[in-house]
Image: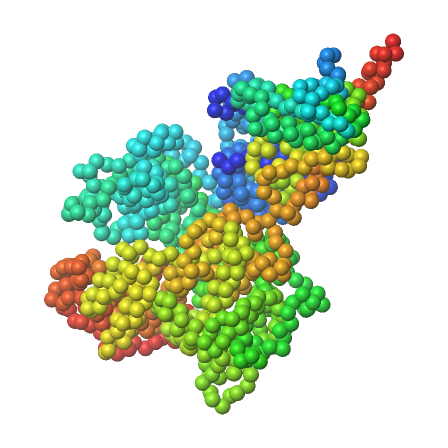
Amino acid sequence: MLKSKTFVKKTRAGGVLKIVREHYLRDDIWCGSEVCKECKDEAPVLQEDACIESNLCAYPHYLIPDTNVVLHQIDILEDPIIRNVIILQTVMQEVRHRSAPIYKRIKDAIHEKEKHFYAFTNEHHRETFIEREQGESANDRNDRAIRVAAKWYTDHLAKETNGGSLKVVLLTDDRANKEKAEQHGLIVYRCEEYIKSLIGNPELVDRLALQSDERNEITGSKLLFPEHLPLSRIQSGIKNRVFLQGTFHASRDNYLEGTVYINREGEDINEVLLQGLQNLNRAVNQDVVAVELFPKERWVAPSSVVLQDDSPNDEDAEEDETEKKLKSEPLESSILKPTGRVVGIIKRNWRPYCGMLSQSIIKEATRHLFTPADRRIPRIRIETRQAANLVGQRIMVAIDGWPKNSRYPNGHFVKNLGTAGDKETETEVLLLEHDVPHQPFSQAVLSFLPKMPWSITEEDVKVRADLRHLCVCSVDPPGCTDIDDALHCRDLPNGNLEVGVHIADVSHFIRPGNALDQEAASRGTTVYLCGKRIDMVPELLSSNLCSLRSNVERLAFSCIWEMNHNAEIIKTHFTKSIINSKASLTYAEAQMRIDDTTMNDDITKSLRGLNKLAKILKGQRIEKGALTLSSPEVRFHMDSETHDPIDLQTKELKETNSMVEEFMLLANISVAQKIYDDFSECALLRKHPSPPPSNYDILIKAAKSRDFSIHTDSAKALADSLNDATIKNFPYFNTLLRILATRCMMQAVYFCSGMDSDFHHYGLASPIYTHFTSPIRRYSDIIVHRLLAVAINADSTYPDLMDKHKQSALCNNLNYRHKMAQYAQRASVAFHTQLFFKNKGIINEEGFILFVRKNAIIILIPKFGLEGTVFFENKDKPSPHLSFDSEGPTLKVEEHTFHIFDKVKVTISLDASNIQHQRIRMALTEPVIPGVSVPAPESEPEAKKPKLDR
Amino acid sequence: MAGLELLSDQGYRLDGRKASELRKVQARMSVFAQADGSAYLEQGNTKALAVVYGPHEVRGSRSKSLHDRAVINCQYSMATFSTAERKRRPHGDRKSSEMSLHLKQTFEAAVLTELYPRSQIDIYVKILQADGGNYSACVNAATLALVDAGIPMRDYVCACTAGFVEDTPLADLCHAEESGGGTSLALALLPRSGNIALLQMDARLHQDHLDTLIEAAMTACKGLSEVLDGVVRQHLEEVSVLTRD
């Protein structure tokens, strides 16, 4: 089988090294076509009748794209219409070298069975391998290799089909390559030519990436931007400290401004301000760029002007005027920031963007501007023929490039998401914008689900502790279907109490390494949006087999403590178990049982025992300095038919909430200790770093305004001083302070114990912590379950579990997913709040000032948990006299001075003037300031019937 | 950008081999007339020269001699021009002493030393070109040299390396694969009995994978033994033709 003809390939690296590698050529690499009888391929990929209707090639054909086509037109290749494509190894290697994300995408396409993409290993095929000739560049050699392979396919298929109709078509955008290929008698088309010829799929044309060909020079020869420097000069510049490298963050409010964060250590400047289009020089948010600093004379303060790029059309209008406006800002030497300009882009971080089309004024035009939903992204020019259909739709667009003579980047249309303002569309947009994987689970993933009907087997009973007789119950929010924890408590003969926390045994169903596991690992967490849940694991598991519902037998992972009546742990025991929950209660139901003295059944007794212990545990925890923080959370009451929010309610916390929480914390801490003891190198833990003192400035200042002092030396001191800060006739004051304190905190993160030394959880005041109790909705818990299972010899280990680098990479993904899930959640709440106010009309409400800014106050409405800004400067009205005192902080508007925590009254309405960025508008009604506040509406406007409003 | 892709999705390695395929092995015996036995062996681009002297009386201090069996003395060295970078390699550096020791252990297990009490057998191996699997090339070359010297052995000793990439065991690693990270396991096998003469691995590998890796290395060794056997028989034919005249 091994017919090895040894070739020697020589490459030079570093000038001196001579690397000699063997290169075996084979004659057992098959062409992968169904028609071929000669090749002994067992499962040919390419179909016999490979037909895409095209008026250029009326015969069945296979496509061979060259490297640049794959790199630039990957969106096209991924389309389900494009099938039967041969991807050459030469192309794969070049793509791998040039762009990792595209390499990943093309690999995914090859794995997709429906696509019939075949990877042909031409470099190792005896007849298609070529050696580089004298004086031939590597690129030319690769182009030739592609042509040779295409030629071989042409001949091979012609021989197999006896001159039949099956052909191969080479796609290339390189003119020289095309000419040469034609000389060899190949069928060659430019990608654009070919796609345009496809009958019945005109929408594909819109997805063509624009090539920076001379044809596309739309904006004339006027250069708008300075040239980017080549990478080699950037690198040497960075080395010589002439340039700085950093990540570009565009400003949300001002499209002519951005900041580059320098992430190198030992640099005394860590932020560079960029102002003006010329200096931004085509950097797009999140790009890694090289910047050159300006001399100190040109350093300025960041402008506080809000500028939005909304010039009406495609014209590259002169920006001089607005830029002048920027520069005429008064200068205060104390707050000057280093400024600079972008000299080159080190790495683009472009992704497809969601947004809307602004149609060109000229009716027949095919070039239009696209406005992304994210304000930090510039508008993108795209070419489409279906503009009329796309207006008012949310669409997705990818950037192809930004030539130096174009005001806007060029891009192409990727996909239509639906009508803007539609609930489904908006949800889709916010999921996409927050990078939440939300496609339905693939067949491969579903294939690893247990077969229904599922039941507990003999073997399970043998290896697990049978706890079916225990009086276990679960307590959850109403409507919860993914129940992952249940509790029990009973008296032991020796007078102590036995407390058990039973967690759904998800790791029993999700075995390491399979597609289901990988999918769950990549999703990382279940995302809860208003009225929608994006599951981490398929529903069969999340809502059925793993969910610890009442009166069914379920597998669980139990953590059982023996405690005395002072809640001191005497013994801890972990075991895999089988339980049968006796009741699924809501928090309110559980509370009712505890309070109702007439009820004395087992469940109620168990709950009372738990509740008593929980109170002691909580007391101990607070004694140690655990923080009780607060954030305004709201729940929507949804209309059961339209799923529109009809009422809004702040979340209420009952004693039972804290009871469940207390035991979950205890279980998490016990498990964290256990897995860390057994696997000191690779335990997955969660930490919450203590915030730097400067974070507390706002809080301290705010408290000082009401004559309280907040001590932030330790968590304990902070907790105590927060407890003391209460005002008798202002009960909400303490909550406001706690809301502010929450804003000062750092993010809690997952990490691998072998990669870090600081384990402390600041908020919970625990030296060690992890997540164990929600494996249905968090992947971290699944890993912790596996670790614990290995530690108690209940399950076998696998290599990746013990690899701290892989663990650490996993943690990074989980942290990212959690952050994004949180943002998505907030965005969803914001969107539903908007829907709610759209239905309500204008409302008057009471609120408190949360922050005082230079030209605005930020107000929190406790009733809705809603935050909004009241601006005192208005475009069309003369602005009132403002004086800001940063010490207070206070803001004096005309005669009235606003302090932090002041009570005010506002009207709330929905500002729908910009369909992409609808927002809640607040206007002041009390205190009355002439010219600033608005008169309160006479009576409550009638709430329109929500159903009619749709 | 990212390092080399050691195993493509299509199942081909860097040099075009499949996971379980060996490199091309070529060998010649009796390359030197002066020595008692000698052999030259190429395993892909790894080239080794082995020379055997003995059995003869123990040279140097008499105290080294053993009363019941022969002493095996191995020396391993690399040519200055054997790697990509030209480098002078003094005798007795750590790496080559370790290698010498490994070779010694391997052949003590294979040679019937008890037939030659109070005597010594010298095995000298030199790597002329290094491209991964130096140890195995040395063992294979030395086996041929011992056969050439007519020293009785229990069996051929065949050695081969195996690595582990993306959950697939790779046989007979080349230099790029060895240095590309991951595990490399060297195994010397007496193929007929299936006994392992030496097993060496210094990287971390999860226990679950060890068996599959050893299995892969053993299969590779058996493949090699067929090649070596072929070389010996061919050599024998050539020699007998010459002597008949």
Quadrant location, the C terminus of chain B: top right
Q: In which quarter of the image is residue B94?
A: top right
Residue B151: x %, y % from top left: 78, 23
Seen from this angle, which residue lies furthest left? Answer: A895
Q: In this view, does A465 lie above or below A308?
A: below
Tell me: A932 left or right of B138. Answer: left
Residue A794: x %, y % from top left: 63, 61
Residue A92 in view, yes or no: no
- The colour scheme of the drawn protein is rainbow
Residue closer to the observer: A786 or A221 = A786
Seen from this angle, which residue lies furthest front? Answer: B63
- Residue at horizontal 55 percent and vertical 42 percent from the top: A106
- Residue at horizontal 27 percent and vertical 43 percent from the top: A273
Residue A565 in view, yes or no: yes
Tell me how many marks there are.
Answer: 0
- Residue at horizontal 58 percent and vertical 21 percent from the top: B91
Residue closer to the observer: B55 or A912 = B55
Residue closer to the observer: A514 or A742 = A742
Residue A932: x %, y % from top left: 17, 66
Tell me: A935 left or right of A316. Answer: left
Residue A797: x %, y % from top left: 61, 54
Q: In this view, does A497 lie above or below A783?
A: below
Seen from this angle, which residue lies furthest bottom? Answer: A598
Q: Is residue A756 above or below residue A15?
A: below
- Residue at horizontal 35 percent and vertical 40 percent from the top: A264
Seen from this angle, which residue lies furthest right? Answer: B244
